[in-house]
Image (tube, rainbow, N blue to C red):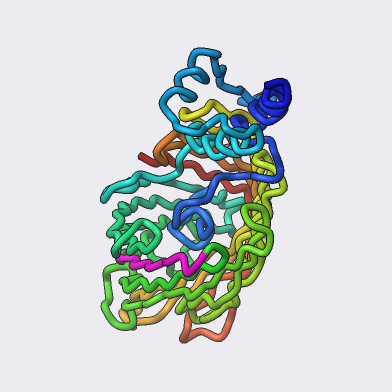
C-alpha cells in the first residue's frame, strides 16, 4: 500500500497535466501530425500557466471499484492513470463528418506610391469521410479566396484575383510509426475575366515516421504548387515536441516554433509562435490590351502570432510580421517588378 501511494504521488500530477516527457502528447488524430500541409492553420500577452485538474479520493475509489484489477499492481496503476491523461487533452478535431469552417484575412501594406498593397479574404469548409476508421481518412475541403491588389496604375494590374477549388486529402496511419498523406486540389485561379490557363491543380505526397514516438517525427515528400516560378518543392523536415509546451515544425517551406502559454483541460490552449512561409501564386489574367496572360506574385513572410485552440478544433489567431523578397511578373513580359519590405497583418477564426 505504501508503494502504491508513492507511485501515485509522483505519477498522477504529471500524467494528468502532460508534463511527463516520457509520454508527451497523446496519440494524435490523423490530421494533427500533418497539420502544416492541410488547410493553412496557424497554432493580450498571457503568463505561462499549466492548470491541473483536481482528482479527489472519491473519484479514485470509484475507479477502483468499477475497474477490475486497477490497483492490483502499483506499476500498472500508474500506467493506467497516464493513459487517462487523454481525457484532459484539448482535441483539435471532431469525431464526425463536419470538421471545421474557417474564415481568415490578411493585409500587406503598400508602403508608398510605387509599392503594392495586397489584401486577402479566405474561407474554407472541411469535412471528414472515414474509410473504415478515423485512422484512414478522406478530408474534403472546398475553399474560396480573393486577393485585392492596390498598386501603381502603370502595372496594369487587375483589382481582384480569385482562387476557388476543392482539396481532397487522404491520409492513413500505416502502423504505430509510419503514416502517409496524399492530396490533390483542382481549382481555378484567375481574375474571372479570362478562362485561358485558369485551371490549376496542386498536390502533395508526404510520409511521416515517428523516430521518437510522440516526440520526434520526420517528414519527407514533394509538394506540387503548379506555379510558373516554383512549380514543385521538396516537402522535408521534422516535427519535434520535447514537452507538451513546446513544438518545433522545422518543415520547408513553412517552419514554425510554438510555445504553449495556457492550458485548461478539455477547454482551451493558448499558443505563441514564430513562423515563416512562402506567399504568392499564379493567376490567369486579362491585360488592359485585352490579351490573356499569367500573373505570378511571390514573397517570403516572417511573423509572430498568437493562437487560441478550443476543444473540438474551434479557435482564433492573430499575426503580425513582415513580407520581403516581393516580386511580380507576367508570363509574356520578361521584366520582373520588385517591391520593398512591407508590414503584414493576418487573423482568422475557425469553428
From the top left corner, tell me how far across and down residue 195 is, in percent: 26, 78
Residue at point 58%, 64% (across, down): 278
Q: Nearer the viewer, residue 34 or 148?
A: 34
Answer yes or no: is residue 116 visible.
yes
Residue at point 55%, 18% (across, down): 55
Q: Quadrant of the N terminus?
A: top right
From the top left corner, tell me how far across and down residue 61 is, in percent: 50, 18
Residue 167 belongs to the span the image colors magenta: yes
| 109 displayed left or right of 227 | right
Q: Nearer the viewer, residue 164 or 296?
A: 164
| 8 displayed left or right of 70 | right
Q: Quadrant of the C terminus?
A: top left
Q: Is residue 349 above or below residue 61?
A: below
Q: Nearer the viewer, residue 160 or 138?
A: 138
From the top left corner, tell me how far across and down residue 94 is, in percent: 35, 44
Q: Is residue 196 above or below residue 282?
A: below
Magenta stretch, main secondary structure class? strand
Residue at point 33%, 64% (across, down): 138
Residue at point 47%, 83% (across, down): 331
Residue 64 belongs to the span the image colors magenta: no
The picture quadrant where one finds residue 188 is bottom left
The picture quadrant where one finds residue 293 is bottom left
Q: Nearer the viewer, residue 189 or 218?
A: 218
The stretch of residues the image draws in magenta is: 165-175
From the top left corner, tell me how far across and down residue 151 is, in percent: 50, 59
Answer yes or no: is residue 287 visible.
no
Amino acid at each position: 500500500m505504501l508503494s502504491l501511494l508513492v507511485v501515485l504521488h509522483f505519477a498522477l500530477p504529471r500524467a494528468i497535466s502532460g508534463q511527463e516527457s516520457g509520454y508527451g502528447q497523446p496519440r494524435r488524430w490523423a490530421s494533427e501530425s500533418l497539420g502544416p500541409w492541410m488547410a493553412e492553420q496557424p497554432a493580450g500577452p498571457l503568463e505561462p500557466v499549466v492548470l491541473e485538474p483536481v482528482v479527489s479520493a472519491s473519484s479514485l475509489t470509484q475507479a477502483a471499484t468499477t475497474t477490475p484489477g486497477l490497483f492490483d499492481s502499483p506499476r500498472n496503476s500508474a500506467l493506467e492513470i497516464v493513459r487517462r491523461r487523454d481525457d484532459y487533452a484539448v482535441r483539435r478535431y471532431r469525431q464526425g463528418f463536419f470538421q471545421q469552417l474557417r474564415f481568415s484575412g490578411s493585409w500587406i501594406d503598400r508602403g508608398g506610391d510605387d509599392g503594392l498593397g495586397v489584401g486577402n479574404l479566405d474561407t474554407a469548409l472541411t469535412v471528414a469521410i472515414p474509410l473504415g476508421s478515423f485512422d484512414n481518412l478522406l478530408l474534403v475541403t472546398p475553399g474560396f479566396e480573393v486577393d485585392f491588389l492596390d498598386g501603381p496604375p502603370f502595372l496594369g494590374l487587375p483589382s481582384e484575383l480569385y482562387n476557388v477549388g476543392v482539396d481532397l486529402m487522404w491520409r492513413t496511419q500505416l502502423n504505430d510509426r509510419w503514416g502517409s498523406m496524399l492530396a490533390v486540389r483542382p481549382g481555378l485561379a484567375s481574375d474571372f475575366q479570362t478562362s485561358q490557363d485558369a485551371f490549376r491543380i496542386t498536390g502533395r505526397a508526404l510520409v511521416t515516421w515517428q523516430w521518437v514516438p510522440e516526440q520526434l517525427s520526420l517528414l519527407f515528400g514533394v509538394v506540387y504548387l503548379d506555379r510558373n516560378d516554383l512549380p514543385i518543392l521538396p516537402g522535408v523536415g521534422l516535427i519535434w515536441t520535447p514537452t507538451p509546451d513546446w513544438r518545433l515544425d522545422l518543415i520547408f517551406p513553412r517552419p514554425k516554433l510554438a510555445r504553449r502559454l495556457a492550458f485548461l483541460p478539455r477547454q482551451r490552449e493558448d499558443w505563441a509562435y514564430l513562423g515563416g512561409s512562402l506567399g504568392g501564386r499564379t493567376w490567369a489574367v486579362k491585360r488592359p490590351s485585352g490579351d490573356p496572360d499569367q500573373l505570378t506574385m511571390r514573397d517570403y513572410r516572417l511573423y509572430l502570432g498568437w493562437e487560441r485552440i478550443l476543444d473540438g478544433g474551434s479557435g482564433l489567431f492573430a499575426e503580425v510580421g513582415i513580407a520581403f523578397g516581393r516580386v511580380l511578373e507576367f508570363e509574356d513580359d520578361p521584366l520582373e517588378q520588385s517591391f520593398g519590405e512591407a508590414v503584414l497583418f493576418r487573423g482568422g477564426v475557425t469553428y
